[in-house]
Image (cartoon, helix red, strand yellow):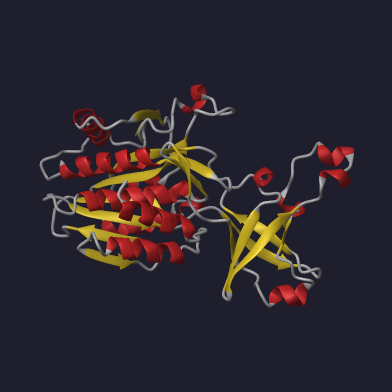
Amino acid sequence: MTKDALKFLTDMVAAPSPSGFEQPVQRVVRARAEDIADEVHTDLHGNVIAVRNPEGSPRVMLAGHCDQVGLMVQHITDQGLIKFATIGGIDAVVLAAQRVIVHSAKGPVAGVIGHKPIHLMTAEERGKKAEVDQMFIDIGAKDKKAARKLVEVGDCVTFELGLRDLGRNAVSGAGFDDKVGVFVAMEAMRLLKNRKISCALYSVSTVQEELGLRGAQTSAHGIDPLVGIAIDVTHATDYPGVEASKCGEVKLGDGPTVARGPNINPVLGKLLLDVAKKEKIPYQVEPCPRGTGTDANAIQTTRSGVAAALISIPNRYMHTPIEVVSLSDLEDAAKLVAEAVARIDDSVDFTPL
């Protein structure tokens, strides 16, 4: 991976972006897009849309969502502790004792999620699953008045942010779901910067996917593409507790997955597989027998319908404080998307026949 591409990924992972609070990461995305696109703008919903060859045809949309799961300040107790709610789907079992950051108007405030120690639990409590309403965030404030000088109700909260190199091309961090998708969408556009393409390419960093694919709905409606490729993460099945028989066999470092199923246009799906084989780009096939739950769903059903596809990055420990992906999978995904886009022009009929 090039140094500037790695810096872009690192800067995105370091930027807070719970659903509805994506502005910090979108500033990073806009700065990157301005170097590779002909046009860049942000719509009223907060989606960042980078455009290459705007007069081309047909319109092709790439979408990765920049929002991540997080928390929100719900209430500040008399003791100065913060009660919180989740933004997006988070299992309470991963929350206890995590270091977090409250992103307030006055700047970041460090905290830790408190939970009753095992020594003080009854036998009945030890056998029960932890619940969010039993937890709180401790920011070291002595009382409510002191806490309110630092944070406000409605402030968003993230896990500790930042990218860590694990070696062997693997990296860890919070929010890879789905900042890596944004990375691939923008990196594919960068790879095409000096190549002539026939289509008009729209690379979109969408918002609020974790709350119901909201940014993809609004941006796809505005762009009105003929073709849409969503880039998201998928569950790697190469670690204990995740069954390949239920999710498909997906391994870190073996390339991105190409989805097959009713959410996927057959012509576009075949194009992606053909390109991967011809260009010798590593890939894995992911069976998706229903709606994928990604931006591809929203894109497919926009207006009178869009030829949709889904490329996914294998991800370990999704929606937890630390996720793990392979940099080579990101690079291969960007190459695959770029090569497919380069082959799309008005002669390609995406009508399933």
Q: Is residue 241 above or below residue 128?
A: above
Image coords of residue 56 (percent x, y): 13, 55
Left or right of 92: which side holds 226? left
| 185 displayed left or right of 84 | left
Q: Nearer the viewer, residue 229 or 170?
A: 170
Depth order, front residue of 221/241: 241
Q: Is residue 277 visible?
A: yes
Picture quarter with the C terminus: top left
Quarter location, residue 307: top left
Picture residue at 33% right of the left edge, 64% below the top? 30
Q: Tell me where residue 39 sits by quadrant.
A: bottom left
Where residue 231 appears, x then y in whole percent? 36, 44
Q: What is the x, y in percent for residue 163?
A: 48, 51
Residue drawn at x 38%, y 68% is 44
> Residue visible at 46% across and 52% down?
209
Q: Quick check: 272 left or right of 94?
A: left
Residue 311, percent across and down?
35, 39
Q: Is residue 290 left or right of residue 83?
A: left
Residue 60 visible in the displayed image: no
